[in-house]
Image (spheres, rainbow, N blue to C red):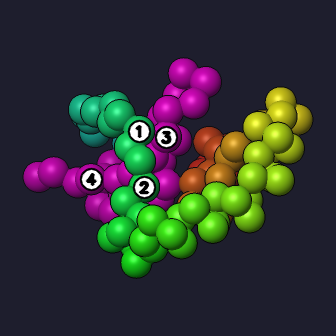
Amino acid sequence: MLTTVEGVYRDGRVELAESPPDVSDGTPVIVVFLTPSLVDLRARGIDEQQARELRARLASFAEEWESPEMSVYDDKPSLGLRSESNNRA
């Protein structure tokens, strides 16, 4: 049986986006590291002109988003990813 669950690798640990159903502790796993990919805007209904306009509107935020202080938001709760301490509940 194969069960697939998304997650992220951070600080030497794999954080799962959700608990896998019907999998007991101690079950062997294989971890595959995916290469980050670009977002296909066309697949999301955004053409080149719309992408240019969106990029221009968001450019003013780029410096702040990329500042070291913003790393506190890297846990990405909007994606349903939780730190290991939150998965113990």
Q: CA distance from mark 1 to mark 4?
A: 18 Å
- Extent of the magenta region: 1-24
Is 17 magenta? The answer is yes
Q: Considering only order in the chain, which callout, 3 or 1, is on the residue closer to the N terminus?
A: 3
Q: Which is nearer the N-term, disc 1 or disc 4?
A: 4
Which picture quadrant has residue 83?
top right
- Residue 39 is labelled as 2
- Left or right of residue 88: residue 43: left
Q: Secondary structure at mark 3?
A: strand
4 or 76: nearer the eye?
76
Q: Is residue 53 left or right of residue 32?
A: right
Residue at position x 50%, y 33% from top?
9
Of discs 4 and 2, which sits in the foreground?
A: 2
Name the mark nearer the viewer: 2 or 3: 2
- How packed is label 4: few (under 14 Cα within 10 Å), some, or many (20 or more)? few
Residue position for label 3: 8
Q: Which residue is mark 1?
A: 36
| Residue placed furthest toward the front | 49
Left or right? Give the position of 84 relative to 72.
Answer: left
- At x 29%, y 61%, the residue is 22
Q: Residue 75 in the image: state x and y as whole percent.
A: 68, 46
Residue drawn at point x = 54 percent, y = 72 percent = 50
Identify the element where label 4 is drawn: loop
Whether pointer 2 and pointer 3 mark residues with C-beta atoms closer than 8 Å, the reply is no
Q: Nearer the viewer, mark 1 or mark 3?
A: 1
Q: Nearer the viewer, residue 3 or 28?
A: 3
Residue 19 seen anywhere in this rendered image of the structure: no
From mark 3 to mark 4, how far is it between C-alphas?
13 Å
> What is the CA distance from the residue labelled 4 to the residue labelled 2?
22 Å
| x and y, in percent, of residue 24 in the image | 33, 49
Label 2, label 1: how many angstroms apart (C-alpha)?
A: 10 Å
